Image: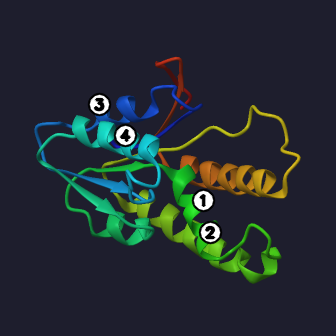
Amino acid sequence: MARVLVTGGVRSGKSRYAEALVDASAPAIYLTPGFPADPAADPEWAARVRAHQARRPAGWRTVETLDLATEISAAESPVLVDCLGVWVTRLLDSWQAWSADPSAWGNDFDTEVSRLVKAVARCPQVVLVTNEVGWGLVSEHRSGRLFADQLGRVNQAVAAACDQVVLLIAGRPLTLS
């Protein structure tokens, strides 16, 4: 494992594949920018989070953060990030970008992406999970187009900093580079 970007559609097996790339017998850092699970508010989301947590080896430390760049830069053990699609969503939420003009948040977004790419390029062992957004229809909703556009930019930038990109289709990996 070096720097690997794992992409694919929803429920394609991305997370399981990415987890298998990290040595389960050694310490690792599992970075998640996801929303905290609240079983009362969203039992289905909470069940998904629990399933991910149950698969993680005991020696892995979980960190919930939006500041992926800082955590990756400080890591002294392998890092797994799951997932960049959630990270983009949370960033856009934090700036209320869904209805705001890009001039209000675009520079902040570019800065965060640049910080992430630099951290990935310097990290000796990092696996990042993302969603593939390039095969669907162009959304009729501004928020859908905004998400796809920004995640597509992030995926391209992070892929350029990685040694390998793997596409998961129906649980099967296809190495792209």
Residue pointed to by mark 1: 89
Horizontal and vertical percent position of residue 44: 45, 40
Instruction: Between residue 51 and residue 27, name the one nearer to us.
Output: 51
| Residue type beneath disc 2 | Asp
Q: Amino acid at mark 4?
A: Ala
**Mark 2: few/some/many CA within 10 Å (<14, 14-19, 20+):** few
Identify which residue is drawn at 76% across, 82% down.
104
At x 31%, y 49%, the residue is: 125
- The mark that comes first in sequence, 1 or 4, is 4
Local SS, label 4: helix
User: Which class describes the residues within 10 Å of circle 4: few (<14), some (14-19), or many (20+)?
Assistant: some
Residue 2 versus residue 16: which sits nearer the camera?
16
The x, y position of residue 94, in whole percent, is: 59, 74
- Using the numbered discs, state the Cα–Cα distance from disc 2 to disc 3 in whole angstroms: 31 Å
First in sequence: mark 4 or mark 3?
A: 3
The residue where tag 3 is placed is 20
Residue 29, can we see it? yes
Q: Nearer the viewer, mark 4 or mark 2?
A: 4
Q: Which residue is mark 2?
A: 93
Circles 4 and 3: CB atoms closer than 8 Å: no
Which residue is labeled 4 in the image? 47
Q: Residues within 10 Å of mark 3 (few under 14, many from 20)?
A: few
Amino acid type, mark 3: Ala
